[in-house]
């Protein structure tokens, strides 16, 4: 069953296409990451799916409804985590989360959500006094308070320190474990790799590749790079069969500092968006 | 929860946020009272024929300007800020009914405006011997002038919020009509008959002149009609002009309201 189904989505600003024929299928319960450089059409696509923006053309179905004609009941089933909001600055974390719980038919317990995002110690602090990372965690709390079936996360961990990112990742895994569908956009490829069941790369308003983080862009079957330091200094060899190469080489010499590397998700990604040096 | 219940919850939230912004409370909310203290002290003579003092005239008129401040300025700046800081975008992504947002703003403006009126009357009673009316008919007049004034100026404030490119420019955009109207509507310069007729003619197209005139009819003795342009309180015309601005304001809001800056 599809949580999100998109066919031929188009959106132009002043005659310039921002989204130029995007197709997407995201299954219920899936964690899906949309990767792409700034200006690739990521945010426009997500904002259309959230019901924040009108599309020019294409079919869009989100949780069985058209986000362009969103009803209150439909909005109650999705959760949007905003990217750069500074609202509710004068309210405490607890006041804000409790208030937003009142909008939904079956909200989560506010104190549990605050605990879940790791803000229990800051529950009485004004939102305007939180650090950047804490503020983003409040945004996550407000996005999931309504017990959504589908959560949109637009670059959620920008500005997080490494520990906060790990905490955030476990929160996403927890939501996914409960069966929540998650659409995430991110700049961090390790984040996509750690969280997503599937990823798609968007560039120039089109999806240029789609697959699991392990297989994206033929990553699993791509040639491996074997590096070692031999008698004549550092050596590099590319091969589809590194095991045989190493067996063969080791008959003749000592292979110091031997490494075997497949392309990283970052290598594949940079190839796909055409920015590899 | 029903729209009304959510609207009431939003109203409580809006009030909490408003009165927690210390500098806004001190510098915006208290400004009309500060100006009243100054004007009422500078011009303290008696208008013997009309049976009122200048400072009483300023008090009644400043009540009208105070309402304009707490409704028009509060919403003009407040909604522009909500548009910029993500408040509106966030709400748009929840099942909250749009009407509940405006209901919450109405609660905020109604309470803030009543508090503003109370503050200004306290200044008038304590410093300038203003006597609060005991006749229920006068308080009834206060009620409808207050209600029509708050609603029309709130709607105009929401509509004007769209003129501001950002929340930083919003106070400047709102202050131009606010200060300009106070000069030509009989707030800063009293009695209103001291103003050139053409100026008052322009002011008559806008709500402030009528709100102030209505408030003078509540808080000043009837002899003070001698200091009005028409020599009368003109309640019918006041209700008509303010009612018309409610309709125009609503139409402007419906035509121009945007949830985001984009």
Image (cartoon, coloured by chain):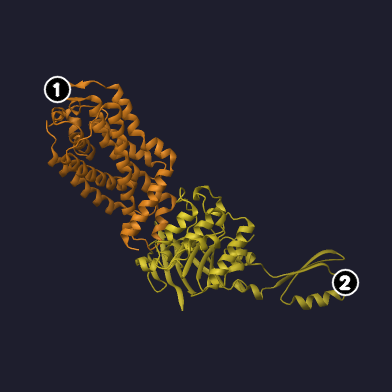
Can the viewer see residue B132 in this picture?
yes
Quarter holding residue B68: top left
Res. A253 mark: 2
- Gap between marks 1 and 2 measured at Cα: 117 Å
Same subunit under labels 1 and 2? no
Extreme front residue here?
Answer: B134
Foreground: B26 or B159?
Answer: B26
Q: Which chain is yellow?
A: A
Counting every numbered tag in the picture gives 2
**Callout 1 crowding tier (Cα within 10 Å): few <14, some 14–19, many ≥20:** few
Asked where in the image residue B25 lies, by quadrant, the reply is top left
In the image, residue B262 sits, relative to residue B175, either above or below, namely below
- Using the rendered image of the protein, determine whether residue B72 is visible from the camera's viewpoint: no
Residue ID at (31%, 59%)? B4
Residue B196 in which image quadrant: top left
Asked if residue B55 lies left or right of residue A256, the reply is left
| SS of the residue under disc 2 | loop
Using the image, name the chain to which the residue with label 2 belongs.
A
Which of these two is toward me, B118 or B177?
A: B118
Q: Position of residue A97 (x, y in %)?
A: 46, 58
| Residue drawn at x 33%, y 50% as measured from the top left | B105
Q: Which residue is mark 1?
A: B49
Q: Nearer the viewer, residue B231 or A194?
A: B231
Q: Residues within 10 Å of mark 2 (few under 14, many from 20)?
A: few
Chain ID of residue with mark 1: B
SS category of the residue bearing label 1: helix
Image colour for chain B is orange
Please give the name of the residue rendered at 49% of the width and 54% of the height, measured from the top-left corner.
A93
């Amino acid at each position: 069953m599809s949580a999100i189904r998109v066919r031929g989505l188009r959106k132009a600003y002043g005659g310039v296409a921002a989204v130029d024929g995007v197709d997407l299928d995201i299954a219920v319960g899936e964690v899906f990451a949309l990767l792409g450089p700034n200006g690739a059409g990521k945010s426009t696509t997500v904002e259309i799916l959230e019901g924040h923006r009108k599309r020019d053309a294409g079919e869009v179905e989100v949780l069985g409804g058209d986000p362009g004609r969103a009803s209150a009941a439909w909005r109650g089933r999705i959760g949007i985590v905003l990217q750069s909001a500074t609202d509710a600055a004068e309210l405490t974390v607890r006041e804000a989360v409790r208030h937003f719980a009142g909008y939904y038919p079956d909200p989560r317990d506010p104190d549990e959500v605050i605990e879940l995002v790791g803000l229990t110690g800051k529950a009485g602090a004004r939102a305007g006094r939180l650090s950047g990372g804490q503020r983003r965690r409040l945004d996550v709390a407000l996005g999931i308070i309504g017990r959504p079936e589908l959560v949109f996360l637009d670059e959620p961990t920008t500005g997080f320190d490494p520990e906060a990112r790990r905490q955030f990742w476990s929160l996403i895994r927890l939501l996914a474990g409960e069966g929540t569908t998650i659409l995430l956009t991110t700049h961090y490829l390790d984040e996509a790799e750690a969280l997503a069941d599937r990823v798609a790369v968007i560039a120039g308003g089109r999806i240029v590749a789609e697959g699991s983080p392990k297989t994206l862009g033929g990553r699993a079957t791509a040639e491996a790079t074997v590096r070692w330091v031999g008698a004549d200094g550092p050596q590099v060899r590319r091969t589809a069969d590194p095991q045989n190469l190493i067996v063969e080489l080791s008959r003749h010499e000592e292979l110091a500092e031997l490494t075997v590397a497949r392309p990283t998700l970052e290598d594949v990604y940079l190839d796909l968006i055409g920015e590899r040096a | 929860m029903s729209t009304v219940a959510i609207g009431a919850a939003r109203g409580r939230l809006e009030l909490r946020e408003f009165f927690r912004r210390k500098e806004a409370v001190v510098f915006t909310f208290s400004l009309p009272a500060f100006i009243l203290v100054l004007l009422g002290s500078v011009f303290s003579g008696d208008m013997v024929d009309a049976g009122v003092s200048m400072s009483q005239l300023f008090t009644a008129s400043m009540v009208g300007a105070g309402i304009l401040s707490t409704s028009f300025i509060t919403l003009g700046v407040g909604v522009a800020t909500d548009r910029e800081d993500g408040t509106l975008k966030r709400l748009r992504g929840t099942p909250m009914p749009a009407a509940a947002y405006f209901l919450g703003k109405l609660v905020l403006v109604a309470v803030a405006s009543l508090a503003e009126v109370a503050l200004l009357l306290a200044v008038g009673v304590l410093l300038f011997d203003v006597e609060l009316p005991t006749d229920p008919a006068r308080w009834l007049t206060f009620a409808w002038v207050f209600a029509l004034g708050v609603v029309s100026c709130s709607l105009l404030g929401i509509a004007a919020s769209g003129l501001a490119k950002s929340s930083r420019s919003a106070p400047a955009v709102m202050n131009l009509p606010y200060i300009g109207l106070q000069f030509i509507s009989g707030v800063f310069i009293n009695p209103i008959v001291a103003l050139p007729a053409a100026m008052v003619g322009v002011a008559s197209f806008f709500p402030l002149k009528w709100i102030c005139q209505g408030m003078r009819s509540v808080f000043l003795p009837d002899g003070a009609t001698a200091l009005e342009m028409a020599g009368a309180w003109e309640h019918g015309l006041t209700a008509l002009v303010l009612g018309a601005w409610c309709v125009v304001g609503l139409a402007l809001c419906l035509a121009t309201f945007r949830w985001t800056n984009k």
